[in-house]
Amino acid sequence: MINSGVAERLENKIKDGYLFTASNHIKSLFISSQWTRGRSPFLRVPVGEIGGDRDAGNSRNKSQESRQLGAIVKMLPSQEASKIYHDNYMRNSRAIGVLWAIFTICFATINVVVFIQPYWIGDSVSTPHAGYFGLFHYCVGDGNSNRELICQGTFSDFSSIPSGAFKAASFFVLLSMVLILSCIACMALFFFCNTATVYKTCAWMQLLCAVCLVLGCLIFPDGWDAEVIRDMCGEETGKYTLGNCSVRWAYILAIIGILDALILSFLAFVLGNRQNDFMHDEIKAENKDLAVSRIEIRDTKDPRFGVQRFP
């Protein structure tokens, strides 16, 4: 049974996101609640009957009223906590997810540039000839003073690539580019599939992309002993020894891309796991609130007072 003064104080305990109504003009008090932003069903719970001695002392009434009010407002604690967590999480995860998508697009741009541009290694002030080399395309000078460059090599014609190591490096960097572009295409699945699944799929793609870039960067120096490179960079040039030539910006950008891909992959895994954790917490909260079948509080001094909730 609930003191009639409780109903008048319930309005002060209403939280955002709940529809909360109370009726005390009849013999029974009902509390109706609905979590408007969650998945909890509409719940109409008979709490008890209004009763008790209206002429009882004020101190006893206030004490009993406080206990009854506390029992009522705690009827859906996990739903309320889950809703607050849901709002905060969605606000933060959307912002982080947008940043993750933007940096993924930036990394894809880096990957395309690294694959296309022939500026992985190049000449220096001490090289006999001018020139530069990429994964499959290269330009070298003819030794004249005008420094005119002759360019060769295309990805479609593997025989024009000067080294087998360059061919392998070109393949792995191309594979990394395909993976990151596929990752961007998979972002459209956010509108159709489970968010956590999409995040984890993209995370694996980005991780594989980083692995392919690592292989490309490690294999590429193995081809520095090619004859055309030795002619430009000097006799001291060999595998993993660049001689008089120098590393150019595309190679450095590829190494930065590896770190970028690893960070993006880690962030996508975190976002995916947090999505799963949130869904599990939300389901547990709903099951907990709906599984409670009875709450009863009685005044030891007066057994006529009490609070009950029935399923």
Image (tube, rainbow, N blue to C red):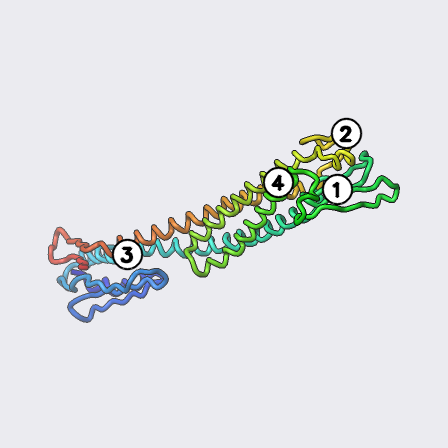
From where the camera sits, is residue 276 visible? yes
Q: Residue furthest top?
A: 236
Residue with the mark numbered 4 = 168
Q: Secondary structure at mark 2?
A: loop
Cα separation between marks 2 and 1: 17 Å
Cα separation between marks 4 and 2: 24 Å
Q: Position of residue 202 (x, y in %)?
A: 49, 50
Foreground residue among 39 and 269: 269
State the residue at coordinates (85%, 39%).
Answer: 143
Foreground residue among 148 and 278: 148
Viewer-nearest of discs 3 and 2? 2
Q: Position of residue 260 (x, y in %)?
A: 57, 44
Residue with the mark numbered 1 = 132
Q: Secondary structure at mark 4?
A: helix
Cα separation between marks 1 and 4: 19 Å
- Which of the two labelled residues, at mark 4 and mark 2, occupies the earlier sequence position? 4
Amino acid tagged 3: Leu
Neighbours of disc 4 within 10 Å: few (<14), some (14-19), many (20+): some
Q: Position of residue 144 (x, y in %)?
A: 87, 41
Please give left or right for residue 216 compared with residue 77 in the image.
right
Residue with the mark numbered 3 = 76
State the residue at coordinates (15%, 53%).
Answer: 299
- Which of the two labelled residues, at mark 1 and mark 3, occupies the earlier sequence position? 3
Cα separation between marks 1 and 3: 69 Å
Viewer-nearest of discs 1 and 3? 1
- Which of the two labelled residues, at mark 1 and mark 4, occupies the earlier sequence position? 1
Viewer-nearest of discs 3 and 4? 4
Q: Residue furthest right?
A: 145
State the residue at coordinates (11%, 58%).
Answer: 304
